[in-house]
Image (cartoon, rainbow, N blue to C red):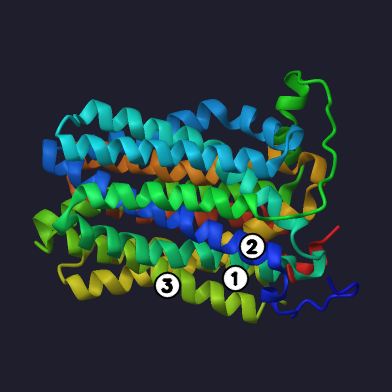
Amino acid sequence: MNPQPDSAAWLGQYRAFVLFWFARVFASLALQMMVVAVGWQVYDMTGRALDLGLVGLAQFVPAFLLVLVAGAVADRYDRSRVVRLAQMTEGTAALVLAVGTWQGFLTRDLILALVFMVGAGRAFEAPTLMALLPRLIPLPVLPRAVAGSASANQAATIAGPAVGGLLYVFSPTLVYALSAALFFGASILIALIRIEQVAPKREKVDFAALFAGIAFIRNNPLILGATSLDMFAVLFAGATALMPIYAKDIFHVGPWGLGLMRAMPAVGALLMAIALARWPLVRNAGRKMYLAVALFGIATIVFALSTSFALSLLALFVLGAGDMVSVVVRQTLVQVQTPDEMLGRVISVNALFVGTSNQLGEFRAGVFAHIVGTVPAVVFGGVATLLIVGLWTKLFPDLLNVQSLQKEMR
């Protein structure tokens, strides 16, 4: 590595980061393909919006139950090994889905159980994977690496739903089998990463150690503000779970249309991630984060009320671009302001607040849609997001006034 790297250094020169990037693409691609297949299969099986919400809940519950344990494991054990085991767990669940679909023994309850298994794997994989990132590249390059890592996830989120939706038309079994292969492939790529291991501190595992991540976030207004803003925005604006209803009952576009709808937020997010990797936020980063989350809420409302498939795709594109600005600001603040010995626990709590709020938001959307209807449920989420943005500007003024992310490095 260059001993004095420039913040504009080319990320491709770091072999460990390249392997990390492709591993994240593989795992994210597998997850997105599986999510599309499960959503369509469950709704086709039962025809109930509530069951779509239960799919989200099945992913949320293990993440909620394991968040503190996953963070402690990431800080006490070899992070590479933890990630590999988690990805193999997810791959095994995908393999059972493939065999079950092929042999015809899948039921709604079995699918939910396997989704729960995937959620358990994700509870360990997501925070531990991100805790690896600061060890792969020099600190001055970290903001761009965060954006580059996010672009991996978004690239997969574009291709995954589209490929998954298309392949589902021909063979649901093939979708799950390919997902399993990609999870196992990601595990192999992580195993190839060679980095200087920092011996973890084997501190006594007690309640104080387990809750240290929560305490750290609570005492850091920048991280608390960014994390909670994302959490509530995603929690209320959880339109993703209801996309099978839009695809099947409103736009009548079938599985391929569902894949396209799920891909569009990732298209917007990917292009924004590429832009942020090339041109990092050097001024008004906090203000731009608030504006981006507000744009996320507005785009959600447009999507909810649209009767045009093309306009809905455009709204989802804008929604994804806005969300990516928030993701990059939040993840960079978490990683540059947290000591390495606590990074696993802090990222794990952050993943619970933000990542699992996707699943809990899907459950909320499914329940609301079951009670008041699909369109009102999505409109409510967008309006609630705008109200949250207004309230958070008053509660977290320090976050609003953040300028360059690099200046926040400790």
Q: What amino acid type should be assigned to the residue bearing mark 2? A: Val
Give the image quarter of residue 147: bottom right
Residue at disc 2, secondary structure = helix
Q: Which residue is mark 1?
A: 288
Image coordinates for residue 171, horizontal then vertical, percent: 17, 53
Q: Residue furthest top?
A: 206
Task: Out of 138 and 64, give the one closest to the viewer.
Answer: 138
Look at discs 1 and 3 and give the one toward the viewer.
3
Q: What amino acid type should be assigned to the residue bearing mark 3? A: Gly
**Mark closer to the chain start, 2 or 3:** 3
Q: Could you tell me if the residues under marks 2 and 3 are in contact, i.e. CB atoms within 8 Å? A: no
Q: Could you tell me if the residues under marks 2 and 1 are in contact, i.e. CB atoms within 8 Å? A: yes
Residue at 49% x, 61% y: name it. 25
Give the image quarter of residue 160: bottom left
Q: Quadrant of the N terminus?
A: bottom right
Is 161 placed left or right of 258 in the picture? right
How many numbered marks does the figure carry? 3
Residue at disc 1, secondary structure = helix
**Mark closer to the chain start, 1 or 3:** 3
Label 1 CA crowd tier, 10 Å (few <14, some 14–19, many 20+): many
Residue at 78% x, 68% y: name it. 406
Look at discs 2 and 1 and give the one toward the viewer.
2
Q: Which residue is mark 3?
A: 268
Residue at 82% x, 52% y: name it. 196
Task: Residue 372: tell me if it is visible.
Answer: no
Label 2 CA crowd tier, 10 Å (few <14, some 14–19, many 20+): many
